């Protein structure tokens, strides 16, 4: 379970990069886009493929930071640890906590 857990996180980062590029280059906006107005604006100003890649890297940076922050919080490394902790366990009930640090 531990390896697939982290593979899912890595897949989220890859999906983010792919999603940004898809939004910016598809002939029509994908149905899953939440803010079509913002997406259309970005599409109108970022036409060079190199600029699209820079945007994807920028967004991936935020996603990576958010995922890291979530792992730190789950692992008890944030201020919320004083209130309580969340423990992630696999199907066998074994904690994933030691693998998050």
Image (tube, grey):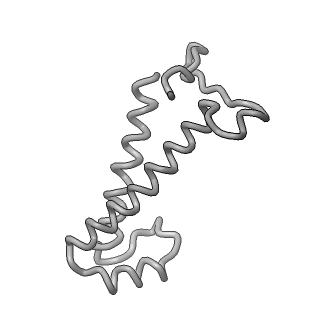
**Residue 18 location (% of width, % of height):** 31, 58
Q: Residue at x 34, y 77 (%)?
A: 28
Q: Residue at x 33, y 86 (%)?
A: 44
**Along the horizontal axis of the image, is 40 left or right of 73?**
left
**Residue 93 location (% of width, % of height):** 61, 15
**Residue 97 location (% of width, % of height):** 57, 23
**Residue 47 location (% of width, % of height):** 25, 81
Q: Residue at x 20, y 72 (%)?
A: 49
Say above or below: 89 vs 59.
Answer: above
**Along the horizontal axis of the image, is 94 left or right of 16?**
right
Say above or below: 80 vs 18.
Answer: above
Q: In which quarter of the view is residue 54 placed?
A: bottom left
Nearer-the-camera pick, 1 or 77: 77
- Count of picture labels: 0
Nearer-the-camera pick, 19 or 47: 47
Nearer-the-camera pick, 99 or 19: 99
Q: In which quarter of the view is residue 4 placed?
A: top left
**Along the horizontal axis of the image, is 94 left or right of 2?**
right
Q: Work out which residue is located at the far right of the displayed protein and give it.
A: 83
Say above or below: 86 vs 52.
Answer: above
Q: Residue at x 54, y 37 (%)?
A: 71
Q: In which quarter of the view is residue 21 placed?
A: bottom left
């Amino acid at each position: 379970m531990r390896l697939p857990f982290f593979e899912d996180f890595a897949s989220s980062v890859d999906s983010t990069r792919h999603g940004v590029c898809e939004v910016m280059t598809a002939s029509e906006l994908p149905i899953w886009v939440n803010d079509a107005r913002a997406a259309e604006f970005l599409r109108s100003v970022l036409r060079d493929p190199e600029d699209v890649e820079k945007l994807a890297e920028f967004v991936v940076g935020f996603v990576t930071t958010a995922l890291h922050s979530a792992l730190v919080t789950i692992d008890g490394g944030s201020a919320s640890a004083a209130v309580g902790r969340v423990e992630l366990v696999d199907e066998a009930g074994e904690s994933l906590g030691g693998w998050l640090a």
